[in-house]
Amino acid sequence: MPIATGVNKQVGYKQETTWGTLAGAASGKLLRRVTANFNLTKETYESGEIRTDYQIADMRHGVRSVDGSLSGELSPGSYADFFGAALSRDFATVAPITTLSITIATGVAIGSVSTWNVTRAAGSWLTDGIKIGDVIRFTAGTFQAANTAKNMVVLSVTGTVLNVIPLNGVAMAVEGSAVTGATVAVIGKKTFAPTSGHVDRSYTFEEWYSDVPASEVFTGLKVNTASMALPATGLVTCDFGFTGRDLAQTGATQYFTSPTAQGTSGIFASVSGVMLVNGAPVALLTSLNININRNLQNATVVGSNSIAELFEGRVAVDGDFSAYFENSTFRDLFVNETEVSLIAILSTGSAGNADFMTIVLPRVKVNSNTRDDGEQGITAQHSFMALLNAAGGAGQATERTTISIQDSLA
């Protein structure tokens, strides 16, 4: 009799049309995973009856629900559905800006990092929706080779000038004569925690054990938590926690028919990318963890052994980072309750147009400062809370949000 093995297990999912109702069997997707577990849980009720025989006479099973967890190595495009669901907004494209006349000049250096000013002759970057932390690229126009197929991170925005750095650190070239017919594109798609127009996404998940064979199909799964962990060295990881309604069906055949195969995009390593604090690149961080919590709550009603609804709570974003103790900068953020922006841009490699993912926290408050002690480099640990950036929005240099994410393959 065969025993199920993880290497032969497939985990598929598909967005539901109606919460708790099986999504159609066609067009499912297989997950990339390190581990994924979905399990039916039940409340249990033990009798409190006092008896002369000293025994417990009965207990009952109660309300059914599903707990799910997914751990993966973060890669572009692979988990966009779940990050969008966690923020209650689907990833969407930003319209490219066309027919531009562009010049490029050297900007003011930030420490040892060179910056570049991208200037348009007419119109407004702010009106066209470019935000701090966006990764942009020239997709039309006869630019010099050093400026083509190159991801650029936006450090600041005014009406006509973008101050940028190349994501791969390779210098750009000055374009003294205007490049006409140019197009600037915000690459991939973006999502953020919106202030209105929220969407409510739920999913059907299947665990398919081909070697048994056995299928377990769960419905009504919503993203309750999402987190990202960036170590000093190693791969970037992500974890998602799900809450759902029920184990809808079991069987000996796979429910999802011909699901889309697992993706193959490159996995992020912490050493490839850029970290920005208040718009300035930093090279002292030794770890960064970002957590999103949706605070879902089960609704139970008399006469039903399944939850009746999943109520959504606020989008709470917090985390922590550690950095080598070089000066008082991070300490003073805590001491003086100074708010800053925090941006992490991850890249799959050193190519100018490598796939990437950005996480922008436009308003962060540092809530702790503790240092370790030892023979070698001393590090300081800092927790933080991300807050609504009320100063952002349409026509502004930042989004009106707590967190924004851009994914080149979403």
Image (cartoon, helix red, strand yellow):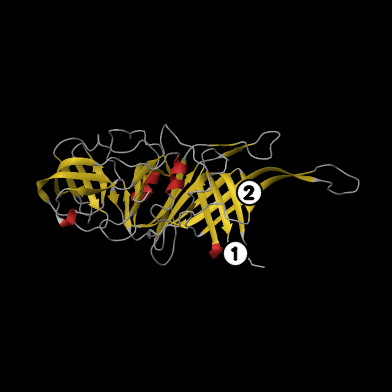
Query: In which quarter of the view is residue 162 placed?
Result: top left
Q: Is 317 rendered above or below residue 288? A: above
Q: Earlier in the sequence, mark 1 or mark 2?
A: 1
Label 2, residues with CA under 10 Å away: few <14, some 14-19, many ≥20: few
Q: Position of residue 140 (x, y in %)?
A: 19, 48
On screen, residue 202 versus residue 54, left or right, reads left
Q: Position of residue 348 (x, y in %)?
A: 34, 59
Q: Give the residue pinned by disc 2.
A: 249
Mark sitting on residue 211: 1
Q: Check disc 2 and give the amino acid type.
A: Gln
- What residue occupies the far right of the structure in this picture? 52
Q: Check disc 1 and give the amino acid type.
A: Asp
Mark sitting on residue 407: none
Q: Residue drawn 25% across and 43% down?
A: 156
Q: Foreground residue, 31 or 259? A: 259
Q: Is 268 rendered above or below residue 58? A: below
Q: Foreground residue, 33 or 403? A: 33
Q: Foreground residue, 368 or 119? A: 119
- Classify mark 1: helix, strand or loop: loop
Specify whether residue 115 is in view: yes
Q: Position of residue 220 (x, y in %)?
A: 57, 42
On screen, residue 328 versus residue 40, left or right, reads left
Decide: marks 1, 2 in contact (CB < 8 A)?
no
Quadrant holding the N terminus: bottom right
Specify whether residue 369 is in view: no
- Classify mark 2: helix, strand or loop: strand
Q: Residue drawn 44% across and 34% down?
A: 198
Label 1, residues with CA under 10 Å away: few <14, some 14-19, many ≥20: some
- What residue occupies the far left of the structure in this picture? 177
Q: CA distance from mark 1 to mark 2?
A: 19 Å
